[in-house]
Amino acid sequence: MESFMAEYSGIQVPPATRIGDSLRQVGTPSLMLDLNAFEFNIEQTAKLARSHDVALRPHAKAHKCSAIAAAQIAAGAVGICCQKPSEAYPFVRQGIRDIHISNEFVGADKVAMAIELARHVRLSVCVDHIAQIDALGMAATQAGVAITVLPEVDIGQGRCGVSTSDELVTLTDRLARYGGLRFGGVQAYHGGIQHVATWEERHAAAGRSAELAARHVQFLEARGIACPVVTGGGTGTVEFDVRSGVFTELQPGSYIFMDAAYGSNEWAGSFVPRHSLFIATTIMSTAKKGMAVCDVGLKGVAVDSGLPIVRPDSGADDLTYTAANDEHGILNIAGDDRCDRLGDRVLLIPGHCDPTANLYRQYIGFRGETVEAVWEIDASGLSR
């Protein structure tokens, strides 16, 4: 047995690509990042935030990659959001020092992670129940660490967050009991309006949500409680939230990638991200007339927000992704295509970037037709 193990211990999966390879050489399926579009999206959004004196705190749950977070901070972001405590660890190891956990969490293991993170970074968290405050407050005070707490208010999402200002004050009063906790402001996020299809309707919905957030802030201020941070917003509403006069900090995530779901929104303003995230796939079977089978199925693309679409400018306009099986993607071939497509490469735009990225271990960055970077998705799978 030992000799068997010694003989085969050196067998490793070869890398999908190397820097300098052509796109044709990249092994598929692979998660691809068009660096020109990616850099445009980062700079456009950073410029928008700067021009309105609003802080940008991008959501790392979209990409789960410390190299991308570093690029966002280099462009002016004040820090990042993570959705789960465990997700923050790779970013801390790579030097990110300002992290907001934009989600409630419960359990001794989660509290312990928050305490450990707070020893190394400026940590802020969300709460919407006094029991969350008590658990975190006792642990933080005992450990001698400081954690900033932002109670979450519900501005229409109907998921997490308190609904009334009286409930909000109950939380702020509870925070004052603990020396290890500091009130930092409020979180106000409405994910449901990010994909309202038309620009005008999305604009109106964002305005209603901002007004609800403003009422909570005004209620606190009337009680002598300053609210230094109002954080929230997302890719679909960032151009409205930044001009609202309510939000001091924005949390868009998908703007760097612009998946197919966001791409189906109407974008009539000046903020129009470009598609930068693609899945490279190879047609592996053409045995059935009018159909091609590629090597990207459910294990390589999330379909909760719709099936992936073929990159419009890729010269494959006759192909439509119509079904996803575990390891196979079904492509319909329009018209009377007599050309055998076996071996053809296709770039797909995923319907939902966040869960798609979580299926992979690296981004392959390309410029033109050449691989320029390989970035590890170092927070992939961290969902505690």
Image: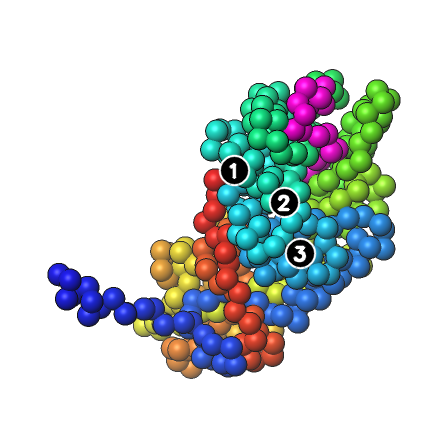
Q: Give the crowd class for mark 3: few <14, some 14-19, many >=20 residues within 10 Å.
A: many
Coloring applied to the structure: rainbow
Please name the residue shown 49% across and 72% down the image: 346
Q: Find disc 1 in the rendering and name its residue.
A: 113
Q: Is residue 128 above or below residue 323?
A: above
Find residue 141 and report its horizontal and vertical position in percent.
Answer: 61, 26
How many labels were placed on the picture?
3
Which comes before the other along the chain, label 1 or label 3?
Answer: 1
Q: Nearer the viewer, residue 270 or 367?
A: 367
Q: Is residue 22 above or below residue 358?
A: below
Q: Is residue 191 left or right of residue 331?
A: right
Q: Is residue 288 shown to the viewer in this render?
A: no
Please name the residue shown 61% across and 31% down the image: 144
Find residue 38 and report its horizontal and vertical position in percent.
Answer: 65, 65
Is 145 one of the magenta-colored residues? no
User: Does the CB distance between marks 1 and 2 fall below 8 Å?
Assistant: no
Q: Is residue 340 shown to the viewer in this render?
A: yes
Please name the residue shown 51% across and 77% down the image: 19
Q: Is residue 128 above or below residue 1?
A: above
Q: Is residue 8 left or right of residue 298?
A: left
- Looking at the rendered image, the disc whose residue lies closer to the viewer, 1 or 3, is 1
Which comes before the other along the chain, label 3 or label 2?
Answer: 2
As measured in the structure, the alpha-carbon distance from the residue carrying label 3 to the one carrying label 2 is 25 Å
Q: Give the crowd class for mark 1: few <14, some 14-19, many >=20 residues within 10 Å.
A: some
Which corner quadrant holds the N terminus?
A: bottom left
Residue type of the residue flagged with mark 1: Met
